[in-house]
Structures are given as C-alpha cells and as structure tokens.
Amino acid sequence: MSSRLQHSVLVVVTFITLLWVIELADRAFGLNLYRLGVYPGELHGLLGILFAPLIHGSWSHLASNSFALLLLGVTLLYGYPRAALPVLALIYIGSGVGIWLFARHTYHIGASGLTHGMMFFIFTTGILRRDKFSMALSMIVFFLYGGMVWSIFPQQPGISYESHFFGAITGILAAFLFRNRDAAPATKTYDWEDEAAAGEGEDPDQK
C-alpha cells in the first residue's frame, strides 16, 4: 500500500471513529445532540452548519454513512490530495448554509451531505478533466453510489433530502472550481506507440 493511500485511509478512519464516539456518548449520556443540527431560519440553527455532519439519528444511519465516507473519502483524498481540503470545506460549509436557508423547518443532522458532495465532486471532475485516472475514479464511484442521484429528491419524510441536494450542488460547484488543482497523471507511452508515430511521419516515397 502506497504512503498516500495509507494516509488517506488513516485520515478517513480517524474521522469515522470520531463519529462513532460522538454517537456512543450521545446514547450513553442522553445528550440529545440532535439539537445541534441545522435548524433552518433560526439563529441557534446556525450552529448546525458546524456540528450537524457529526451527529446521527440512529446506529443504522451512522453505519450507512460510515461505509460511504470510507470509500468516497479515501477516493477523494487519494485521487485529489491537493483539492481535497478546499473541496471538503466547501461541501461541509456550503451544504449547511443551503440547508439553513432553504430546507424544511426541522433539525437536519448526519454526514449525508458530505457523502453526496464527495460523490458528485468525483463524478463531475471525471467528466470535466477527461484524463484516464479521473474518468476511472468517476466510473467507480458512480457504479457504487450512482443511486445518490435519486436521493436528492423528496422520498421518505424522515430523510433530509435537502442535505443530499445541497451536498450534491456544492460537490458539483467544487468540481468546477478545483478540478485542475491536482495535475493529471503523466500519460505513459510505449515503444510501439513511438515507432508507429515515427512511421506515420515518414515520406512514403522514401520507404
């Protein structure tokens, strides 16, 4: 395993561990941390922009987000190490602001905005950059999490589709802003390709 991949896994696993510790403390001590979620239109709800992605409504909610965070987070950090920090900052803050401004008047919690933002960033970046590496990452995440496209629309009453929607929007915006922050991998050429190119450039009369 390369050092960059190891670093990516370590960072993401540390963050996921933090989420589980927070959920355990919430359940064990009855902290009712959902009140630190984003509550649209209310001043106290602004705190949720910082804290909502760290809080979950159930163990199953946390588990499903944990798997997505692991796969998408490692892909983002490994594939786009220079862009990862500003991308995550934009998704984290931007999706929370969008929820506070436009979402339904209830508490919105969970890391779903982050997962949707990362998926849409990686997918859109592959389309915009069109180098083989970015396109491969784009296809992989779409194969695994393409269903997120449908979850940005209203479905079940207890699910914050607004978090999904604004996560997706900020992920797409981040792709346009930061798609070129990481240089495209060098294209490998083979000897037979060089020979073929040289052959095409020769004068036919001299063959």
Image (cartoon, rainbow, N blue to C red):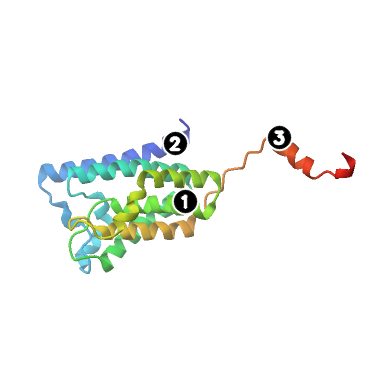
Compared to residue 192, the image places residue 101 above or below, namely: below
User: Dividing the image into 4 quarters, which one contains the C terminus?
Assistant: top right
- Whether residue 105 sits left or right of residue 188 in the image: it is left
**Where is mark 1, residue-wise?**
83
Mark 1, residues whose alpha carbon is within 10 Å: few (<14), some, or many (≥20)? some
Residue 142 horizontal/vertical position (percent): 40, 47
What kind of residue is marked 2? Leu
**Residue sticking out furthest to the right:** 206
- Quarter of the rendering containing residue 189: top right
Disc on the earlier residue, 3 or 2: 2
**Where is mark 3, residue-wise?**
192
**Where is mark 2, residue-wise?**
5
What kind of residue is marked 1? Ala
Q: Residue at x 38, y 44 (%)?
A: 72
* SS category of the residue bearing label 2: helix
* SS category of the residue bearing label 1: loop
- Whether residue 127 sits left or right of residue 194 in the image: it is left
Compared to residue 37, the image places residue 26 above or below, namely: above
Between label 3 and label 2, give the one nearer the viewer: 3
